[in-house]
Amino acid sequence: MFKLSKKKTQTQEISKEQQINDVKGSAKNDAPLSFPNIVENMLNDGAHFESDYFILKTGLGTTKYGRSFFVKPSGYPRSVRIGWLEALFTGDDLDCSVHIEPIDRNIAIKRLQDKIDEFDTVIYSASNRGDQAKIDDALQKREDTKFLQRQIKNNTNGLYYVSVQATVYANSLDELNAKCVEVENEVAGESIEILSAFNRQKEAFLSTLPLGKNYLPKSDRNLDQLSLTAIFPHASSKLNHQGGFPIGRFGRDYVYYNNFDSSLNNYSLGIFGVSGSGKSVLVKQIIARGYMDGIMKNVIIDVEPEYRELTYALGGVVVPIHPSKNDDVSRINPLDIFPEKEVKNKGTEDEYIEEKINLNEKVKEALEFFKVMKESLTPDNRGLSPVEIGVLNDILEELYISRGITEDPASIYEQIEHIDDFGTITYRKQLIPMPTISEVYEALCKEMKNDYGEELREICNIVKLFTRNKAFGMFDGQTKIISENNVSLDEAPVVTFDISKLSSNGIERPLAQHVLMTWVWNRFIVSNPKVKKRVICDEAWMMIKYASMMEWLKLLSARGRKWNVSLTLVSQRYEMFERTEAARDVVAQFDTVCFLRQSDQDISPILNTFRLSEDVGNLIRTASTGQVLMKAGKQIVTFQSEPTPEEWVYLNTNQNVEMTPKKKKTRSREEMITWLEDKSHIPDGDVA
């Protein structure tokens, strides 16, 4: 009976177990589908916590070492600036969490009153002892607390409990220790003291995960609303531009810049920085990477011969400009005239390009050239007199009209007959010979002898110096381009005018800059309005003392949007542009400015002009080589200009830096575009 009963009982128990399993199985089959939540997605293969670090198993054969720490409650700086926690937010392989808990307004007022009473006690006690230092310290703290209490009562401030934790990761314990020392040194620069979460690594690690909870007790302190606001990163790591090209890196992300973005009112770009701050490398990156954004024509006025390598690497042409009595050198005629093309009914089905010769505009432009001549060679920088302007205007008009030049674009061309070895006759279009400075000089001499006498003697003597074989005769004669690699100006993606052999003292270089800028405007800009173009004027400070040159730069910058061109002005001293109104007007036209490291004298003008804070001034005063602060429209970003190893061969301007020991290869235009579009040579990071 007992045994049978026992068996029966066992059978009944087994039956119950089966029923329970059947119910569970049925429940599983009826359960709705579910997906992993955020916590389940964060699960790793395993974690082992030591007293001062922990080990994460991130794969079957890989592990990561980590160490969690927090900002010591008494280790916050006495005063904070915007971005004071940037070192933790942008650290390499580092997670940072800021836990914020608001304190009820009434409770905050009461606790601050308790603190005020406490300071009153300290002051009373210190007075009895005669401890003046203690009294002064307590009075200052009492006043600060009282001021904060008044702000909270007026609802213009608030009080919060704040805790800052972070976790740094590495592939080995030695690497982890080295990274932690580096982080500690970086935050020490902001007077921040951090502590390792010793024996509390698990709690601190959980606090840095996106769980929304602080597991680490005794790690928080109170901050007011203003101090709390300064914690958050106010500088974006990226510009809100459509398209663009990578101009630099912010932390681990690329910053993409579109020079022709619709958010910019003007396409012009100013780049300022002291010698050695990385200006040239940044400009070269902008030139080379501009192909990625469709900028297919770059014209460079090269004051120092540092753009040659880049020009040849991009399949461009270098045109040296220097005085010579021989005829085997390149020459630019400032009196050349080219057709002006303008897009009509833009963006509609009826869009067309109107082409004409703007003779009146060319005469005014030539008058400015002669005005610069006289300004540069007279002691008091006098411009042209009314008589000189009138005579020169008549002479220039006559020289153009006598050649049959009208508003018709065909009037500046002539048909040239060519017979080859087989007797085949072909005709090709060629520009007619243009007026030259020598012709203007001869006409001035005639006018002086006939009608005006002494009134034209001074301008005659000045213009004579700019004729062939004279001191400044490099621009007298028909335009002639001699290219070392036989690339035509129209085909070249980069055209560099090398004026480095001109004298750096006196008028030669500034005059060459002015002549070339006006010639480039007519030859490349107004003659092709639809293509994106860039004109780079290096060492623009040389032109500041000449008002006419500044007016021309201002005009080019202001009208650049209409003609789809970006004037890129590069200079060392920003403060020099603040001295004269004309130079200030030029900079005012720029919607994008880049500041690299600045001298102390330049900081104040920059901050005043662009309404920037003192913190920005400290940043550009102490910036490392290649560190850039960019203001593009209403957006401000900072980034590090970092060329790739392949680019560095063509961008390096420091003779003491060893370049990659590879044979330099000159790429064709098509090869360079393919190389830039292929982003495989760009280090890992965000790709637009």
Image: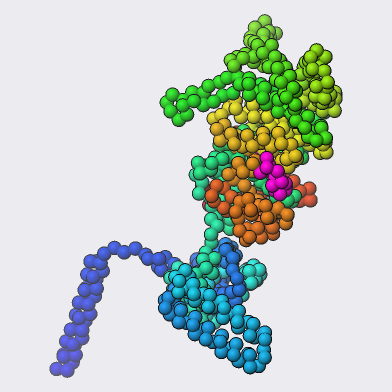
For the N terminus, give its image quadrant.
bottom left
Residue 497, placed above or below residue 246: above
Residues rendered magenta in the picture: 568-584
Q: Residue furthest left?
A: 1
Please provide percent x and percent y for residue 116. Answer: 53, 83
Picture quarter containing residue 295?
Answer: top right
Question: Can I make out residue 220 in this image?
Answer: yes
User: On the image, which quarter does residue 529 sit in?
Assistant: top right
- Pick the front one: 182 or 189: 189
Q: Is residue 257 left or right of residue 285?
A: left
Q: Is residue 9 left or right of residue 47?
A: left
The image's colouring method is rainbow
The correct choice, above or below, for 622 with respect to 356 in the image is below
x and y percentages locating residue 108 in the rendered image? 45, 78
**x, y (%) of residue 146?**
53, 78
Q: Which residue is found at the position 16% from the left and 90% from the top?
A: 4
Residue ID at (40%, 66%): 38
Count of marks placed on residues = 0
Tell me which residue sits at (61%, 58%) in the image.
613
Viewer-closest of 181 and 349: 349
In magenta stretch: residue 580: yes
Q: Residue furthest top?
A: 423
Q: Nearer the viewer, residue 669 or 630?
A: 630
Residue 492, x across and y down, in percent: 65, 30
Residue 527 among magenta residues: no
Q: Is residue 293 above or below residue 213?
A: above
Q: Is residue 275 above or below residue 219?
A: above
Residue shown at the point (61%, 37%) measured from the top left: 557
The answer to whether any part of residue 333 appears in the image is no
